[in-house]
């Protein structure tokens, strides 16, 4: 079966399976427009099965995608739009969590770049982190917040950790490209709020040769 095709302009398709149930989900960004080599209109969607995808196979269909964002509600007047990075995970209460990154188009800087979290149980979205580059640039398809990885604690609190790469103007190479640092943030309330960022890499190398 096929739940989307290349002509649908989808980016990302992370799959999550629940640790204590038969839930499985796939999430993606449905891209609706592109300009200057970048996606600038998109919505976050997902599909979920409660029986390890057996219903998907039996019906030869994955059903109707569920849209969790509404960036186009103002007819794209603000152009806040998801980019290419998206990931998803279940916690130990079968709650589905989805993380994605947005930027503002058509500003050349895409500022601000924001990392967002959504969970199915609350249906609410929270801001995890945000950054802006005013002088430095970044490499193609890697916005200044990117490459998220999620972990969940098996305890009564269901702590969430998100690890990602973040870039700022404070640390750039000799070519003016921002050097990324690995950041971790945690939440003790299913992503409603997030604690302070904890840098995993703390070695700044301003003015370094590209690639070093």
Image (cartoon, rainbow, N blue to C red):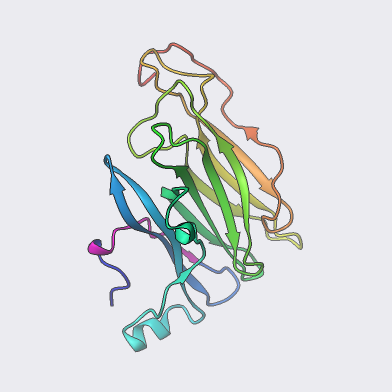
Residue beneath the point at 54% across and 60% down: 89
- Looking at this view, is 162 or 32 the one in front? 32
Q: Residue at x 35, y 88 (%)?
A: 59
The stretch drawn in magenta includes residue 10: yes
Residue 22 lies left or right of residue 61; in this view the side is: right
* Percent x, y of residue 10: 33, 59
Residue 28 is left or right of residue 114, and the answer is: left
Q: In this view, does 63 lie above or below 130?
A: below
**Quadrant holding the N terminus:** bottom left
Q: How many marks?
A: 0
Residue 48's x, y, as percent? 48, 74
Vertical arrangement, residue 76 with respect to residue 167, above or below? below
- For the C terminus, the image quarter is top left
Q: Position of residue 13 (x, y in %)?
A: 38, 60
Q: Does the magenta stretch include residue 116?
A: no
Task: Choose between 85 and 20: the one closer to the eye.
Answer: 85
Region in magenta:
7-16
């Amino acid at each position: 079966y096929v739940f989307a095709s290349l002509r649908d302009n989808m980016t990302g398709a992370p799959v999550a399976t629940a640790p204590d149930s038969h839930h499985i989900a796939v999430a993606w960004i449905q891209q609706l427009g592109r300009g200057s080599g970048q996606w600038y209109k998109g919505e976050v969607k997902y599909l979920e099965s409660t029986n390890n995808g057996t219903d998907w196979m039996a019906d030869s269909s994955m059903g109707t995608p569920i849209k969790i964002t509404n960036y186009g509600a103002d007819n794209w007047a603000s152009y806040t739009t998801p980019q290419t990075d998206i990931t998803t995970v279940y916690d130990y209460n079968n709650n589905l969590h989805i993380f994605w990154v947005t930027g503002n188009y058509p500003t050349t800087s895409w500022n601000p770049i924001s990392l967002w979290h959504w969970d199915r149980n609350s249906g609410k979205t929270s801001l995890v982190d945000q950054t802006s580059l005013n002088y430095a640039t970044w490499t193609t398809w890697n916005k200044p917040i990117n490459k998220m990885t999620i972990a969940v604690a098996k305890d009564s609190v269901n702590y969430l950790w998100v690890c990602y790469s973040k870039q700022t103007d404070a640390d750039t190479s000799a070519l003016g490209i921002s050097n990324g640092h690995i950041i971790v943030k945690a939440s003790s309330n299913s992503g409603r709020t997030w604690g302070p960022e904890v840098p995993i890499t703390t070695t700044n190398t301003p003015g370094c040769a590209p690639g070093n």
